Every structure is written in C-alpha cells, then in structure tokens.
C-alpha cells in the first residue's frame, strides 16, 4: 500500500482557531447554557478546540436577530447592487485567505489540503461571485392575463432561511446554502455540522468584514436533534434548506410540516450508478470510476458507489481498478501528493468497517483493502469488492467511505433496470464512446445529474439535486434562486372602476 509514514506523526497545521463562539446579531457569544463541545482532528481523534454548543434558546436568539434584520432591514432594503457588492467583496476575501481557510478545513475534516486549497476554497469564491451576479438581475414578469388587467409578478425574498449543513464539504455547503439566500435578499440562521464547525465561523467573519450587516447571517454550532431540530421547527423561520442523510431529511420535513409549513429543500443520500459500457476505453474508465467513488474519502452524497461494468471488459476493468486502488496515496492530508486522508470520525469509520464486513459475509469478493491504515485516526485502506450482487447491503445502502463495489452486467436494458432499482436518484456516471448509448442511458436513468465520460463536475451554474429519495428541489445554477424567492402576483385594472 502506498500509505504514508507520517500518519503516525501528523504535520501541525499552520493555522490558529480564532472563532469558537456562536455568531448572533453580529456578535460572537457563548451559548445560553454555557455548554461547549469538542471538535476533533480526524487524523488523531484529538481535540482541536471546544466550541460553543447552541440549543433551542440560542436558535431563538439567532432567529430573532435574523427576523429583525429581515423585517426592519437593512438587508432586504439595501439596493440589489449594494447586496451584490458585499458578496463580491466576500469572494475577494476568501481568495485572500485561501490557504488559511483550506488549512482549517483540512484540520477539522481530514480532506487533503491540496484538494481544499486548489479546488474547494476557490470554488467557494466562484460560487459567491456567481450568485452575487444574480442579486441585481432578479425580476418578475408581465403576464398576459385575460381581461382588462395589468398583471405582473414580483420575485421577493422568502424571509428568514434556516440552513442545516453536513460535514463532508463544510465550506462548500456553506456556499451552496448562504450565497443564493443572501443574493435573493433573505436573512439566514445557519447550523453547521457538529463534526466541522470551524470554517463556517471563519467565513462568517469575512462576510461581516465585506459589509454584511449584523443579524443577516447568524451561525449556530451544535447538534442535530437539539439546535438543528429547533431551527427546522421554529415558527419564525420561513424556509429550511438541508443537506444530509435521507433519514434526517424525513425528520426535517416532518418538523417543518408540524410547525409552520415552512418551505423545504432537501439534498439527501445516494447510491449512484457508474456505468462502464462495452466500448469504453478501459484505462480512462478505471480512472474516472476510481475518482467517482474515492474522491473526498468516499464521503460524497453523489459518489459513484455502484460500478456497473459490461461483461466484455469486466476482467480487465477489475484488475486495473484493484491496481489503481492499491496505488492510492493515503496519509496525512497536510502532506503534498496525498490523495486520501482519514474519514471524518469514529462513527463513520466504524460504520464503513461494518459494511466491509457485511460485504464479505454476503459473499462478495474482497479484492483489496478492507481494514484500517495505521493505529490512530480514522484512515481506511482503499477497498474494492467484486462479484457484488444487487441485493447485498453494500450495493443498496450508502456506505459513505472508500469502498468500491463492482457489479457485472450483460446488456443495456438490464443495466438500466438495475441502475434504477434504488430508492435513491441523485446522480449517475456513463462511460461510453457511443452517442446512442449515452443518449439512451441519459433518458432512461431516473437521477438528477448524469455525468457522461466525466464525474463530479460542480460548476456553480450546474443545477444539483435528487430524484426519488435523494431530495426535493435543486441547488446551484439559475434553479437555485427559486428556493429563496416568493412570487407575488400583482393585478391592476387597466381602467379604474
Ligand atoms: P450524517 O449522518 O452524515 O452526520 P445527518 O443527516 O445526521 O448526516 O447530519 C447532517 C446535518 O443534519 C448535521 O448538521 C446534523 O447536525 C443535522 N441533523 C442531524 N439530526 C437532525 C435532526 N433531527 N434535526 C435537525 N438537524 C439534524
């Protein structure tokens, strides 16, 4: 295994943790209870910092600050151009502090520093600029209604948005949620994931520096069933946006329904097929399928976690996929060249090892990996299973780790049926040189994103979201705006009666 010796002696990150309190109404404050919780370094399991633990009372305070900032201004009352300028300035500040933010993200999350610094943090800036550009281009229609009426629509902000984000891409999920909400003139209470509270607090200070008025963005760190549930069930929150597991998504929807019927968008789990067709260039397909699954330690909701390979190329693909997994460089994520860091925490680490065990017991063939790397932290060897059957748990449930499951198929209709035989419908990969095959699969797959001869392309303009139990609504792109806008119809008689 190409593991790295420095796992046993992690490199110290070159960044300090400056913000650990809750951000409410422009002020950093302790939680009402005075409680804190530790956030851990996934490389070692050691404490990075103790962070204020928000609960119902803190959510109440944050929501009233956001309510006041929305109802009394200044945010929705500023000109759209002024709002866009705040967001543009924030993007500049993100770029200015790129490496510091990336280091914080790697420390709290375990993802390779190079991935954070070269891809994710720059994407955050790009993402804010994309929506900053929309802020002053949001407008309604004039409507050709029957009768003697002048009819127009106004596109207005919804109000206070509650946003609950996961730990796999902490800052990118902050961007996906916060940027469109603010661009449309809403105010926000954001609950970060308890595993990764640090980067959202840092980013929020930069938004303030960029000129965001107090109360427009409030950040409450804390746990799901307490702070998260309070936000989802709050009577003064007008909209909730959530990214996380399907089971939690159901709870959010229920809390929203039981309280004030706030509108809900959900971006949930997946078990995305990656289909390698008989005409595929096997070397390229192996590399793309490897990336589709192993990227971000396998902790992606849209991970290509069912690798379907046509029987004609199956043996060659398998041999090469196994060799590629064995070459994957696992080690301290702060070290250059590292492809895979530790999993986020011991819960996920144990869960992944349990799934590997299910796979072995169900009769799938463990080609490589299957165990931890080193003796501390949450590193797992890149793992490949072959001879996987559709009804095995490793082929139907989300593992969220570096475990590739390879399944054999014979013809296109069969793979369409099997690929669609899932409660999820987030994404799919299609690897083929044949345009007819690509078109047939694209139309037939019941998923929110189809990546043809590529995977995980996350440009700000591309909508993302799920069919079936992978979610409700679309984030990113022009579609993401509608999550944060109300439509008001205005009807005026042409002649005063
Ligand atoms: P995971 O299992 O990957 O941690 P979750 O869906 O549990 O995924 O977590 C995603 C986000 O949802 C986190 O911010 C978490 O704190 C929050 N969360 C978890 N449970 C609840 C809940 N019952 N109500 C509201 N938010 C929750």
Image (cartoon, grey):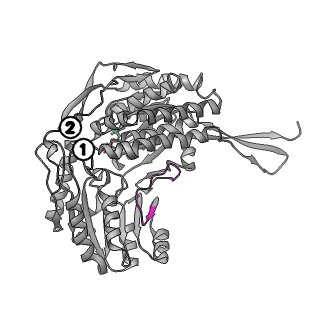
Q: Is residue 268 left or right of residue 472?
A: left
On the rendered image, what quadrant is the N terminus found in?
bottom left
Q: Residues within 10 Å of mark 1 (few under 14, many from 20)?
A: some
Q: Is residue 184 left or right of residue 121?
A: right
Q: Is residue 329 above or below residue 33?
A: below
Q: Is residue 363 above or below residue 234?
A: below
Q: Which residue is mark 1?
A: 335
Does residue 254 appear anywhere in the picture?
Answer: no
Which quadrant of the view contains residue 191?
top left
Magenta-highlighted residues: 450-463
Measuring 53% from the left and 23% from the top, which residue is drawn there?
213
Mark 1 sits near ligand 1, with its Cβ under 8 Å away: no
Q: Is residue 234 left or right of residue 130?
A: left
x and y, in percent, of residue 370 in the image: 15, 58
Q: Which residue is mark 2?
A: 11
x and y, in percent, of residue 444 in the image: 47, 70
Q: Nearer the viewer, residue 437 or 94?
A: 94
**Element class at badge 2:** loop
x and y, in percent, of residue 207 in the image: 48, 29
Would you say the magenta stretch is mainly helix, strand or loop?
loop
On the rendered image, what quadrant is the C terminus found in?
top right
Does residue 129 appear anywhere in the picture?
Answer: yes
Q: Are marks 2 and 1 in contact (CB under 8 Å)?
A: yes
């Amino acid at each position: 295994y190409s593991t790295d010796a420095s796992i046993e002696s992690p490199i110290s990150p070159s960044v300090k943790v400056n913000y650990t309190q809750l951000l409410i109404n422009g002020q950093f404050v302790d939680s009402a209870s005075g409680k804190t919780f530790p956030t851990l370094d996934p490389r070692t399991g050691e404490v990075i910092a103790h962070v204020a633990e928000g609960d119902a009372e803190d959510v109440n305070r944050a929501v009233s600050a956001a309510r006041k900032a929305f109802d009394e201004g200044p945010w929705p009352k500023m000109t759209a151009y002024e709002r866009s300028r705040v967001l543009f300035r924030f993007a500049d500040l993100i770029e200015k502090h790129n490496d510091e933010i990336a280091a914080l993200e790697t420390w709290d999350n375990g993802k390779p520093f190079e991935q954070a610094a070269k891809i994710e943090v720059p994407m955050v800036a790009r993402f804010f600029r994309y929506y900053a550009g929309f802020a002053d281009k949001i407008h309604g229609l004039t409507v050709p209604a029957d009768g003697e009426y002048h009819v127009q629509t106004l596109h207005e902000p919804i109000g206070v948005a509650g946003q609950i984000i996961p730990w796999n891409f902490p800052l990118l999920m902050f961007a996906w949620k916060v940027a469109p909400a603010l661009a449309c003139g809403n105010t926000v209470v954001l609950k970060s994931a308890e595993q990764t509270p640090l980067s959202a607090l840092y980013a929020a200070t930069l938004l303030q520096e960029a000129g965001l008025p107090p109360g427009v963005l409030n950040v409450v760190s804390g746990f799901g069933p307490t702070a998260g549930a309070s936000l989802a069930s709050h009577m003064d929150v007008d909209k909730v946006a959530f990214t996380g597991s399907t089971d939690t998504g159901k709870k959010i929807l229920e809390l929203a329904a039981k309280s004030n019927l706030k509108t809900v968008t959900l971006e949930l789990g997946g078990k995305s097929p990656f289909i390698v067709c008989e005409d595929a260039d096997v070397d390229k397909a192996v590399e793309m399928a490897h990336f589709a699954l192993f990227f971000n330690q396998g902790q992606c909701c849209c991970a290509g976690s069912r690798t379907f390979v046509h029987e004609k190329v199956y043996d060659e693909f398998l041999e090469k996929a196994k060799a590629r997994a064995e070459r994957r460089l696992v080690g301290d994520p702060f070290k250059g060249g590292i492809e895979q860091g530790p999993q986020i925490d011991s819960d996920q680490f144990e869960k992944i090892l349990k799934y590997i065990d299910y796979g072995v017991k169900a009769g799938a063939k463990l080609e490589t990996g299957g165990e931890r790397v080193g003796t501390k932290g949450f590193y797992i060897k890149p793992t490949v299973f072959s001879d996987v059957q559709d009804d095995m748990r490793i082929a139907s449930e989300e593992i969220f780790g570096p475990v590739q499951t390879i399944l054999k198929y014979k013809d296109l209709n069969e793979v369409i049926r099997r690929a669609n035989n899932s409660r999820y419908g987030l994404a799919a990969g299609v690897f083929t040189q044949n345009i007819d095959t690509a078109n047939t699969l694209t139309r037939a797959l019941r998923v929110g994103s189809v990546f043809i001869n590529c995977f995980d392309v996350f440009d700000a303009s591309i909508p993302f979201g799920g069919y079936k139990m992978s979610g409700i609504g679309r984030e990113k792109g022009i579609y993401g705006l509608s999550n944060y806008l109300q439509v008001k119809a205005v009807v005026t008689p042409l002649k005063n009666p």
